[in-house]
Image: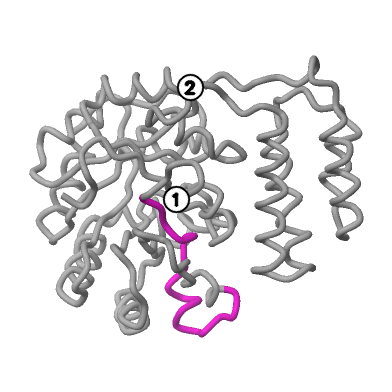
């Protein structure tokens, strides 16, 4: 199996799961994580923006890389680049629903061409000495057959595991997650199946495990601003973070981001990251506005003073 039984896996998140972001997750019990989604076209054209995506921390025990694309030639070129790095697995994105991706035949768009999807899996599986997996979405909310067909093509092409998001691409991240469709697909395959979709707390985690029958679960947006989700779901911690724990994690994450990316990039990235941390925790509008406008170290210090002095009785603990 690609993952140990009962594993909790962090999904690749474009614009988020860089090294500092993963460090935050690792501090709270995350072992299995992926790079940000990397476009094969960016690799072919040696885009400077994708170079840092290949970074792996010295203490990262397990790190997968996720590729998105639709050209066999671009995947062939990418293979030679991947061989230069020490990744634990490579995943092919066949589930991204965003128009700028799926509309070009990548992500969820690639899943609509099962022959090409299978050919790409076969190419990578034959060329690399690390496991190859794929991440798809269910193809129908009412009939599992179309998803089973795609999944079996991927399995027969040589994939070691398959992650299934329980929503169709058109629903993006809203609405019900159809664990029953995932369950039907799981029963039709011999390879490991990982369920994904809608996990944000203990209740949604247990529900997806029960309905899908999958012991391995991938979390995504539910961990944004909430690395403690790994602690709680794996039984390392019973309670959501206190205000001090939240502030300490924000501060550590920000300082690591500064060191990793430099001031200008760090200030820009930190705005959305910090807003995720403080979202729904009762902080006042002026604090949220301050977080959205960080453009200097002084701004960050000022924000942290506001966060730490915020009344404890108004701080809201997320339900985990």
Question: Image point 66% across, 35% down: which residue?
Answer: 245
In this rendering, the label closer to the viewer, 1 or 2: 2
Question: Image point 36% across, 50% down: which residue?
Answer: 32
192 or 173: nearer the viewer: 192
Give how far across and how far down residue 192 sits, in percent.
17, 44
Q: Quadrant of residue 260?
A: bottom right
| Above or below, 171 relative to 80 | above
| Above or below, 40 relative to 32 | below
Q: Which contiguous range is marked in magenta?
A: 32-49
Residue indicated by mark 1: 96
Residue indicated by mark 2: 238
Q: Going from the N terminus, do you reach mark 1 or mark 2 first?
A: 1
Image side of residue 79 versus residue 311, left or right: left
Residue 39 colored in magenta in the image: yes
308 or 14: nearer the viewer: 308
CA neighbours of label 2 inside 10 A, class few (<14), some (14 to 19), many (20+): few
CA neighbours of label 1 inside 10 A, class few (<14), some (14 to 19), many (20+): many
Q: CA distance from mark 1 to mark 2?
A: 33 Å
Give how far across and how far down residue 250 sits, in percent.
70, 45
Give how far across and how far down residue 224 sits, in percent.
58, 40
Give how far across and how far down residue 58 sits, in percent.
44, 68
Image side of residue 230 versus residue 224, left or right: left
The circle drawn on residue 312 is none
Q: Secondary structure at mark 2?
A: loop
Question: Image point 25% across, 67% down: which residue?
Answer: 120
Question: Image point 14% across, 53% down: which residue?
Answer: 155
């Amino acid at each position: 199996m690609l993952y140990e039984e009962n594993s909790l896996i962090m999904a690749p998140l474009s614009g988020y799961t860089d090294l500092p972001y993963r460090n935050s997750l690792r501090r709270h019990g995350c072992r299995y994580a992926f790079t940000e989604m990397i476009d094969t076209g960016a690799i072919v054209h040696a885009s400077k923006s994708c170079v840092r995506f290949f970074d792996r921390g010295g203490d990262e025990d397990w790190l997968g890389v996720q590729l998105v694309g639709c050209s066999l030639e671009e995947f062939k070129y990418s293979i030679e680049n991947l061989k230069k790095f020490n990744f634990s697995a490579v995943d092919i994105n066949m589930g991204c629903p965003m128009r700028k991706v799926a509309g070009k035949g990548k992500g969820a768009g690639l899943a609509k061409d099962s022959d090409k999807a299978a050919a790409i899996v076969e190419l990578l599986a034959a060329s690399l000495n690390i496991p190859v997996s794929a991440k798809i979405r269910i193809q129908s909310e009412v009939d599992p057959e179309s998803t089973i067909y795609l999944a079996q093509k991927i399995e027969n092409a040589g994939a070691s595991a398959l992650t299934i998001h329980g929503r169709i691409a058109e629903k993006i991240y809203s609405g019900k997650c159809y664990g029953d469709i995932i369950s039907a697909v799981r029963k039709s395959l011999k390879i490991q199946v990982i369920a994904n979709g809608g996990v944000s707390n203990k209740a949604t985690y247990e529900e997806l495990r029960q309905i899908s029958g999958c012991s391995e679960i991938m979390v995504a947006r539910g961990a944004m601003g909430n690395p403690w989700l790994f602690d709680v779901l794996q039984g390392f911690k019973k309670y959501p973070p206190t205000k001090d724990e939240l502030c300490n994690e924000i501060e550590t994450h920000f300082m690591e981001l500064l060191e990793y990316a430099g001031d200008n990039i760090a200030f820009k990235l930190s705005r959305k990251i910090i807003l995720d941390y403080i979202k729904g925790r009762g902080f006042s509008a002026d604090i949220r506005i301050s977080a959205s406008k960080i453009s200097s170290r002084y701004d960050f210090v000022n924000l942290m003073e506001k966060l730490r002095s915020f009344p404890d009785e108004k701080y809201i603990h997320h339900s985990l």
